[in-house]
Amino acid sequence: MKDSKYIIGLREVKKSIKSVKLVIYSRSLVADDVESLKKTVPAESYIAEFDGTSVELGKAVKKMFPVSVLAFRSIDPKFEQILKGS
């Protein structure tokens, strides 16, 4: 994963929410923050819950710290077809 293609952290994701294509949040994110995030994600973007803690999400993206929210600025067209269910 290249650093320029994704954004880490709730605050940073909220700052650049208009330019993201996919948002992934950990199950340890507070419910109020999840609702806030869902309201601000653009309709053409996707949002998904990671079935793990923020520590596990951090490890999944090879970071040595917990990651509560991760957003991608661009996604592979093939992956986008999977998200759409086609």
Image (cartoon, grey):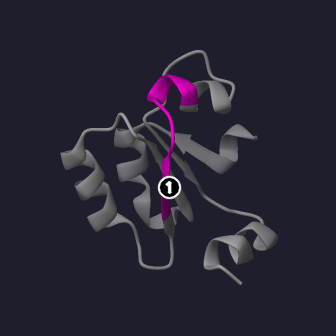
Q: Quadrant of residue 17?
A: bottom left
Image position of 80 (left or right of 72): right
**Viewer-side residue, 48 vs 10:** 48
Specify start and end residues of the magenta stretch as a single range: 47-56
Decide: few, some or many residues near mark 1? Use Cα within 10 Å; few <14, some 14-19, many ≥20: many
Instruction: Answer above or below: position of 4 versus 42.
Output: above
- Determine if the magenta segment contains residue 13: no
Q: Position of residue 70 (x, y in %)?
A: 52, 44
Q: Position of residue 79 (x, y in %)?
A: 75, 67
Q: Quadrant of the C terminus?
A: bottom right
Q: Position of residue 81 (x, y in %)?
A: 72, 77
Q: Mark 1 belongs to which amino acid?
A: Val
Image position of 4 (left or right of 57): right
Q: Residue most toward the bottom? A: 86
Image position of 12 (left or right of 7): left
Q: Identify residue for label 1.
A: 23
State the residue at coordinates (51%, 67%).
Answer: 46
State the residue at coordinates (24%, 56%).
Answer: 36
Image position of 76 (left or right of 55): right
